Amino acid sequence: MDSQDTKFNYKILLAALIAVVIGILIAFYYSHAQAQNKIDFLEDEKVILVKDLKLMRAEVDRLSVANEVNEIELQDSKYRIEQLLDSVGKLNFTVAKLREYRKELRKMELIQDSLKLKNNSLRYNNNILSQKYNDTKAEMQSLESKTASLEEAEAALRRQNKRISDELKMKSYLRLLSPEGIGYRMRSGNIMQTNKASIISRLRACVTVAEDINVINEDKVIYLQFLDPDKRVIANNATTISVNGNTYSKRVDFLFNGNKYQVCDYISIPEGSLLNGMYTINIFENEKLLASSEFQLK
């Protein structure tokens, strides 16, 4: 009876031992499965983290190439990303490490978002500056075109004014016809024409002013210049007139209404002061010689 009980107790112990071993094996299996799942999860998270860091590095490289944000900030971000990539590649992951690197990744993402905002702000400002530059350039081109047109118009106006001025100058001069020089003597209070030089006391000049329809009642001035045979100016009552370095015998003022008009005037000289020879009468207006004629005294 005791032998049978002992065998039975051994069987119970063996069954219990087998049950414990099976329980341990089952617990080890589940523990191993959970550990493997955690490892797979961490590996997947590691891959995602590395991918995010590489994307972030690529964005930083793009900003650096574009030279759109501060170079110091870019270099700092680039350095921190490279450190994280090196750390993620070398370290064995745990949940704590994953949380640590995720937190660091969030910080880097915030920095990257700040860089993107600065980049967008710079792009916006660049677009505004570019638009202003284009507007200013277009306005300058318009102003240059207008300036060129104004310069052309001004040049054309100057040419026109010069032409008109030349025409006016030409029209302002009198057109004189048939100038004539004559000698006179005084006899018993009467004036008599003569060509005998020794008895002449007056030299008279007459000229006809041609009609000018562009003139209406204008004051005109002409200068008479009597020259002796030696081409010296003959004085009127011992007096000559000098205008801008030119010497004349007499000034004659008259009102010209545009119709044909004859102008005559004389100078007085001492009787017996003239010699025989060829005399000249020149008629000037504004220093311009308009008519000339010669007459001989014997």
Image: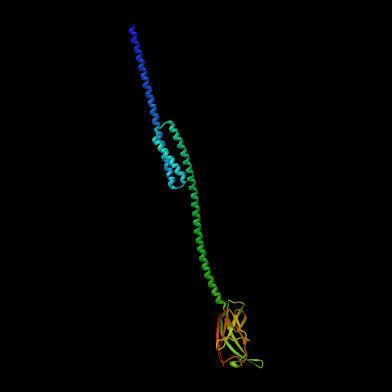
**Image position of 2 with respect to 138: above or below:** above
Color theme of the render: rainbow
Pick the front one: 239 or 180: 239
Q: Identify the image quadrant of residue 30.
A: top left
Residue extending farthest top = 1
The picture places residue 127, in percent across and down from the top left corner, at: 48, 50
Pick the front one: 154 or 55: 55
**Image position of 102 with respect to 206: above or below:** above
The picture places residue 178, in percent across and down from the top left corner, at: 56, 85
Identify which residue is drawn at 35% across, 15% down: 15
Q: Quadrant of the C terminus?
A: bottom right
Q: Quadrant of the N terminus?
A: top left
The picture places residue 265, in percent across and down from the top left corner, at: 62, 85
**Residue 15 visible within the image:** yes
In the shown orientation, is residue 278 left or right of residue 3? right
The picture places residue 192, in percent across and down from the top left corner, at: 62, 92
**Image position of 229 with respect to 46: above or below:** below
**Residue 210 visible within the image:** no
Pick the front one: 172 or 223: 223
Tally of marks: 0
